[in-house]
Image (spheres, rainbow, N blue to C red):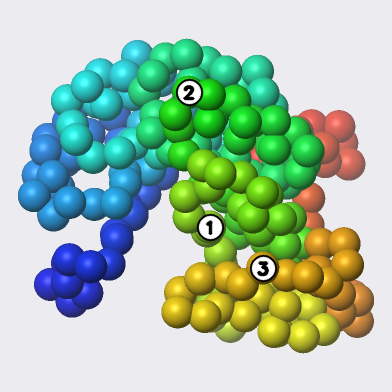
């Protein structure tokens, strides 16, 4: 990847929390010469001691937090000093106002914010509103045109106009439309629902009362 894009493009590497600390150590050491923009979830966010050890051993910024909920969940990440970038998801962490509070806490700890936003146009629109009023916003995730949409609806299929999320030179321009700035194509949502798409929290209660993870 570095050979393909050169050194002027940042590359973020997501471990998805699927690596144990013993394997993460040599992996991160091997990656250091390639100067990644950040490494995301080298271990799961609950492993604070492991995250702290990894952060002490590398110059690569550590990102985490897409599966952390609310201010109190992020508080332990901040106090541990083990992350450089937090990635709260507005759909999970408490909404726009709660994540604005989390971002303000992050600023006090000199931690950057990169909202996690692969869940649809409303999620992305709210994240962009946060970005534009957050001094420590670093980068914005989006699932527009990403590979796992092949053969399935894309994020822009659910809005009336794709220009709501127009990119210019790799950046989103500030949206001046009312509210979150998007108009949902409700017919497209209904059609997707008929075809079996389901939208719900990652932890959702099934008809028999049990809780399943998305």
Q: Earlier in the sequence, mark 1 or mark 3?
A: 1
Whether residue 193 is visible? no
Task: Tell me the residue that label 3 is attached to.
Answer: 174
Q: Which residue is mark 2?
A: 109
State the image coordinates of residue 34 (x, y, percent, origin top left).
13, 54
Q: CA distance from mark 1 to mark 2?
A: 20 Å
Residue sitting at x 83%, y 72%: 177
- Nearer mark to the viewer, of 1 and 2: 2
* Real-space CA distance between mark 1 and mark 3, rounded to the nearest whole angstrom: 13 Å
Q: Is residue 178 above or below residue 164?
A: above
In the image shown, does 186 or 82 lie closer to the viewer?
Answer: 82
Relative side of 63 to 70, left or right = left
Q: Gap between marks 2 and 3, in whole Å?
A: 27 Å
Q: Badge 3: how crowded within 10 Å, few (<14), some, or many (20+)?
A: some
Please tell me how crowded label 1 is: few (under 14), some (14-19), or many (20+) other residues with Cα within 10 Å: some
- Which residue lies at the image location 62% right of the left edge and 52% below the top edge? 131
Q: Residue 43: x and y, percent?
A: 36, 31
Task: Give the answer, above or below, for where 19 lies relative to 118.
Answer: above
Q: Earlier in the sequence, mark 2 or mark 3?
A: 2
Secondary structure beneath dot 2 equals: loop
Q: Residues within 10 Å of mark 2 (few under 14, many from 20)?
A: few
Label for residue 140?
A: 1
123, 146: nearer the viewer = 123
Give the quadrant of residue 123: bottom right
Which residue is found at the position 72% from the left and 62% from the top?
125
Residues at circles 2 and 3 in contact by the CB criterion of under 8 Å: no
Q: Earlier in the sequence, mark 1 or mark 2?
A: 2
Q: Do the CB atoms of the residues marked 1 and 3 lie less than 8 Å apart? A: no
Image coordinates of residue 24 in percent, x first then y, are: 22, 34
**Left or right relative to 122: residue 99:** left
How many numbered markers are drawn? 3
Q: Is residue 43 above or below residue 4?
A: above
């Amino acid at each position: 990847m570095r050979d393909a894009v050169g050194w002027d493009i940042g590359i973020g590497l997501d471990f998805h929390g699927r690596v144990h600390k013993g394997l993460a150590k040599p992996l991160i050491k091997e990656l250091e010469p390639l100067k990644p923009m950040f490494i995301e979830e080298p271990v799961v966010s609950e492993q604070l001691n492991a995250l702290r050890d990894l952060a002490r051993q590398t110059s690569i910024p550590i990102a985490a937090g897409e599966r952390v909920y609310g201010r109190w969940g992020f508080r332990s990440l901040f106090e541990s000093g083990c992350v450089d970038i937090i990635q709260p998801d507005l759909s999970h962490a408490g909404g726009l106002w709660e994540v604005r509070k989390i971002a303000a806490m992050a600023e006090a700890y000199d931690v950057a914010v990169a909202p996690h936003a692969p869940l649809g146009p409303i999620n992305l629109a709210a994240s962009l509103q946060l970005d534009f009023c957050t001094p420590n916003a670093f980068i914005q995730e989006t699932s527009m045109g990403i590979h796992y949409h092949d053969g399935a609806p894309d994020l822009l299929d659910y809005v009336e106009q794709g220009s709501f999320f127009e990119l210019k030179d790799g950046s989103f321009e500030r949206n001046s439309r009312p509210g979150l700035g998007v108009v949902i194509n409700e017919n497209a949502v209904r059609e997707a629902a008929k075809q079996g798409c389901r939208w719900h929290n990652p932890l959702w209660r099934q008809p028999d009362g049990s809780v399943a993870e998305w």
